[in-house]
């Protein structure tokens, strides 16, 4: 089981460490050709507008829209999986959700809290300028995690989007196990 990490921007090494901790092989994806060597892809956090533009430039937008590779998008990665953010920015549009970016505002740039995640259990979640799911546009979208009234984790088929950063918490590797066992292998 080889999990690729899109190596454009964000906490790339931390994802690779978490993948190894979960017991899988990690591979950095720099070029579209690298996609053929992996079983699933992680799109890390970062700044989604910049990441999207770079993904267009390097051909990842078209390649991923036309592939059936399972994808886990964290933070900006979830933004990129979505259908819209209310702003003009390149998106994969693979998940039937819209996103509110920086949903916690500038007063709460980052915070950590324990959450319940479906298929994972209790998990320590790190939020950094986090987006949340604004609207769910299809019955196929399953809510995986909530922070009070905010939707912070979703799954639709082979795609999973999370507002938080599983690569930054001690127990976050369990999210990759869930992703591989319940999403990639199913
Ligand atoms: N606020 C960023 C965006 O919407 C995401 C932040 C993150 O990935 N940590 O692009």
Image (cartoon, rainbow, N blue to C red):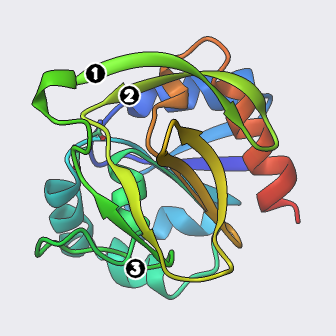
Ranked by sequence position, the earlier of labels 2 and 3 is 3
- Along the horizontal axis of the image, is 159 left or right of 120? left
Residue for point 41% across, 44% down: 44
Residue for point 34% across, 59% down: 79
Give the CA distance from mark 2 to mark 3: 23 Å
Residue for point 50% across, 78% down: 96
Q: Quadrant of the C terminus?
A: bottom right
Q: Which residue is mark 3?
A: 93
Give the CA distance from mark 1 to mark 2: 5 Å
Q: Nearer the viewer, residue 89 or 114?
A: 114
Ranked by sequence position, the earlier of labels 1 and 2 is 1
Proximity of marks 1 and 2: CB atoms separated by less than 8 Å? yes
Q: Quadrant of ligand 1?
A: top left
Quarter occupied by residue 127: top left
Number of labels in the image equals 3
* Ligand 1 within 8 Å of the CB at mark 2: no
- Where in the figure is residue 140, as x and y percent of width and height? 68, 79
Ranked by sequence position, the earlier of labels 1 and 3 is 3
Q: For the residue carrying disc 1, how many other residues have a C-alpha within 10 Å: few (<14), some (14-19), or many (20+)?
A: some
Give the CA distance from mark 1 to mark 3: 26 Å
Give the residue at the far front of this rendering: 149
- Along the horizontal axis of the image, is 84 left or right of 153? left
**Secondary element type, mark 3:** loop
- Where in the figure is residue 149, as x and y percent of width and height? 48, 44
* Ligand 1 within 8 Å of the CB at mark 1: no
Q: Which residue is mark 2?
A: 127
Quarter occupied by residue 110: top left
Q: Which tag is nearer the camera, tag 1 or tag 3?
A: 1
- Where in the figure is residue 16, as x and y percent of width and height? 55, 31
The numbered dot on residue 110 is 1
Instruction: Examine the rendered structure and indicate whether residue 178 appears above or below residue 140.
Output: above
């Amino acid at each position: 089981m080889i999990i690729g990490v899109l190596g454009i921007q964000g906490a790339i090494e931390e994802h690779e460490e978490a993948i190894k901790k979960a017991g899988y092989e990690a591979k950095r994806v720099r070029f579209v050709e690298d996609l053929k060597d992996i079983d699933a892809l992680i799109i890390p956090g970062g700044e989604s507008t910049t990441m999207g533009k770079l993904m267009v430039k390097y051909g990842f937008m078209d390649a991923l829209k036309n592939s059936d590779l399972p994808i886990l998008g964290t933070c900006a990665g979830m933004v990129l999986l979505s259908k819209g953010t209310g702003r003009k920015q390149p998106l994969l549009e693979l998940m039937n959700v819209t996103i509110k970016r920086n949903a916690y505002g500038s007063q709460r740039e980052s915070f950590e809290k324990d959450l319940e995640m479906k298929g994972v259990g209790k998990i320590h979640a790190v939020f950094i300028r986090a987006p949340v799911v604004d609207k769910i546009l299809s019955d196929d979208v399953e809510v995986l995690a909530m922070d009070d009234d905010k939707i912070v984790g979703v799954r639709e088929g082979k795609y999973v989007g999370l507002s938080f950063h599983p690569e930054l918490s001690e127990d976050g590797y369990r999210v990759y196990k869930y992703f591989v066992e319940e999403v990639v292998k199913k």
